Amino acid sequence: MADSKLRVGFVGAGNNTRRHHIPKLKAQPGVELTAVANRSKESGERVAKEFGIARVHGDWREVVTAPDVDAVCIGTWPNMHCELTLAALAAGKHVLCEARMAMNAAEGRRMLDAARRAPHLVAQLVPAPHTLEVDSTLTRLVSDGTIDEVLAVEIQANQQSRFPDPAEPLHWRQDVTLSGHNVMNMGIWYEAMMRWLGPARRVMALGKVAVPRRKDERGTWHDVKVPDHVEIIANLARGAVARLRFSAIAAFGPANEAWIYGSDGTLRLEADARKLWLARRGDKALAEVPIPAEQRIGWRVEEEFVNAIRGREKITRTSFEDGVCYMEFTDAVATSMAEGRAVEVAGL
């Protein structure tokens, strides 16, 4: 399929799909936007009109099984990712699935198994985007001995910096029936951390729900199960200890950042500014690490997906294998919070 036409169908057209996937797939040479199914046919028609998608369906199954669709972009909430991925792969379609991978690791493993049974099809997850421009440099500085042995890691990530509002309606990320074990921005930070430092092997977690009950958009009350603040201590497979904090209630809290403490140096990632800082033994202060423009490889999800289908490159951001790894971590955190104990993180 090196230079042939690639026809893409969309199931779910939320913010990220409209902002990134639809226009950036459309911009790839030889790609046609063939069909879309959204939460309602009316919303699908609005998306189709805005972006020039040829056909609108009221049922996602019609997109997945359409003979003139070669690849399916899944932009739904996590509660549908597994079912849609399995159906698309079974129908012989390439899959680009929105993060987070699934509701839990069991679903993620089902998706991975299905992808492995169809090695001729490309299966890609939308990657954690916030560190893409610094990942290669940070990984190099960790692995080339610049800071020597990594001893400890600290990550603090605020999903939003404001006080909780009890009057706000239930967001889908706070609805465990839609989001599963995914919590705030924990998954994308852990995915990024795996790129630099490898996976965790053991976690201990505590969580806090700030507003225990919220109304949904229809006015129905729901108990909120997804925490608004999580504290995690983890042992990493390579020997370091990590302290991770994720919060949606840290009003006036610190910036999103990661600190990596080595036996001979310290690295600081200033996430929002996409800057790295380094101090080694004997230095008086941290100094910014220059990152050449050609090494700042940012968002190229759609290009990578199309290139992989055409045999020009392999999927690196993000594979289903990496997705299962971050879902195993997510499950372990959920179990630790529920049972009040340290939990081993399953590996592939």
Image (tube, helix red, strand yellow):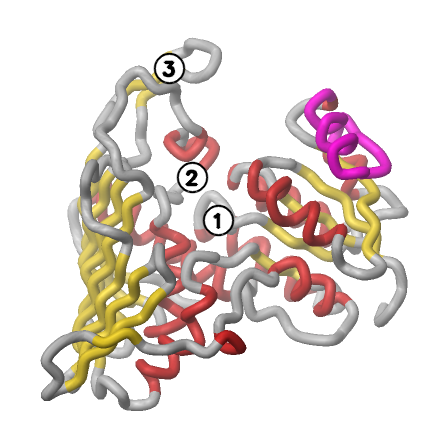
Given this view, does label 3 or label 2 mark the residue nearer the observer? 3
Disc 1 to disc 2: CB gap under 8 Å: yes
Indicate the amino acid at tag 1.
Answer: Arg
Q: Residue at x 41, y 34 (%)?
A: 173
Q: CA distance from mark 1 to mark 2?
A: 10 Å
Spot occupied by residue 41 in the image (x, y as percentages of width and height): 74, 23
In magenta segment, residue 44: yes
For the residue labelled by badge 1, is the local secondary structure a helix, a strand or a loop?
loop
| Quadrant occupied by the N terminus | bottom right
- In primary-sequence order, the first of circles 3 and 2 is 2
Disc sitting over residue 100 in the figure: 1
Q: CA distance from mark 1 to mark 3?
A: 24 Å
For the residue labelled by badge 2, is the local secondary structure a helix, a strand or a loop?
loop
Spot occupied by residue 219 in the image (x, y as percentages of width and height): 42, 9
- In primary-sequence order, the first of circles 1 and 3 is 1
Q: Which residue is mark 3?
A: 215
Q: Is residue 197 above or below residue 113?
A: below
- Magenta-tinted stretch: 42-59
Q: Residue 311 falls in which quadrant of the image? A: bottom right
Q: Nearer the viewer, residue 51 or 93?
A: 51
Q: Say left or right for 122 vs 34.
A: left
Given this view, does label 1 or label 2 mark the residue nearer the observer? 1
In magenta segment, residue 209: no
Indicate the amino acid at tag 3.
Answer: Lys
Q: Residue at x 56, y 70 (%)?
A: 316
Spot occupied by residue 315 in the image (x, y as percentages of width and height): 61, 69
Q: Is residue 121 above or below residue 262?
A: above
Indicate the amino acid at tag 2.
Answer: Gly
